Image (cartoon, rainbow, N blue to C red):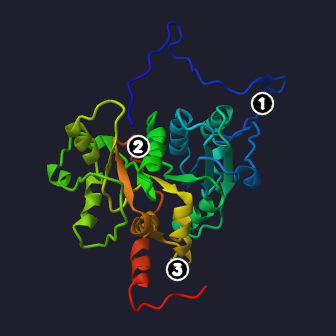
Amino acid sequence: MNRPDAVTPPGTAGRSHTVGPPETPDGPRAESPPDVVDRPLDPGSPDDFRRERTLDVLIPTRNRAAELAVTLSGLAAQEGVPGFGVAVSDQSDGAPAFRHPAVATMARALRHRGHPVLLTRRLPRRGLAEHRAYLLDRSAARYVLCLDDDVWLEPGALHRLVTAITELGCGFVGNAVHGLSYLDDVRPQTHRHYEEWTGPPVPETVRPGTREWQRATIHSAANLLHVTGRLDLPEGTWRAYKVSWIGGCVLYDRTRLVEAGGFDFWRRLPEGHQGEDVAAQLAVLARYGGAGILPSGAYHLESPTTVTERDVEAWEVVLTDAAPGTAQPTR
């Protein structure tokens, strides 16, 4: 993203403002690469982290230090859900993202504000579904927020989601992510897929090719922002609407997610897959119902994907295995 040129302070033109290593009698002291933290950072203990609390935020990440720092900064600014935990699992090709100074600082800020933080590595990579299953197993919280590493949450978003799932009593709620670069790209043909729940969400079986499956189109680009603007909701209010699935920011009732199978279907998938979040949500939706929450406070950073091998849709495999007459794999 381009930014305006910085203003040069008076009397400093032509000078570098980079803070270098301190001088020693033998010249400048050697320093670590700029993307690695010198100060020690406690990663936390899985046993200490896995405690009963209201909420844990689960973030899988790979090769995204800058984005992860932004994601954690959004969490650090949340109010109204005291003591929620944050678990980050890194599968970067090089050093883990939490070795980056910005990520390390935000982890410390979260702890300073009373939030337990667990920083882990999960290697070798076995795919997105296995990574999420690993994170889910780290939590004993009542609710878990599966948050992508390239999503910024506005203040108040977490409290609104927890309030919604508590009042609605369903299996999951979510905030679809906005793509602000599409703010001027209004697509009214997608708005017809917005349909509110008039009571508590009920279980639904949603499948490809149905009208219900098309609900996901409202989550592309900035469509949901345009719908929100049209509704002109009073300050502090929210609405629950019908979904097929939501990407990027989904809050589950943890027990219900586990009862629906969680992400254990990873064993049936090749490493190169996507759509694991869709598969999990379809299972929870069929048992306990789910809803999108508007307004959404989730914003997509619109960085290039780090999931480059994704030839298989996890939900297609799971739905095929669950079809009548399909033999189930043994474990």
The foreground one among 231 and 330 is 231
Q: Nearer the N terminus, badge 1 or badge 3?
A: 1
Q: Residues within 10 Å of mark 1 (few under 14, many from 20)?
A: few
Q: Is residue 177 visible?
A: yes
- What is the CA distance from the residue labelled 3 to the residue labelled 2? 31 Å
Residue at 21 percent across and 56 percent down: it is 193
Q: Which mark is residue 75?
A: none
Q: Which mark is residue 268?
A: 3
Q: Which residue is mark 2?
A: 298
Q: Is label 1 or label 3 in front?
A: 3
Q: Position of residue 71 (x, y in %)?
A: 51, 42
Where on the picture, by quarter, is residue 228? top left
Left or right: where 12 falls relative to 46: left
Q: Residues within 10 Å of mark 2 (few under 14, many from 20)?
A: many
Q: Is residue 311 visible?
A: no
Residue at 26 percent across and 44 percent down: it is 182
Type of amino acid under label 1:
Arg
Q: Is residue 275 above or below residue 175?
A: below
The foreground one among 271 and 206 is 206
In what element is the residue under mark 1?
loop
Q: Which residue is mark 1?
A: 29
In what element is the residue under mark 3?
helix
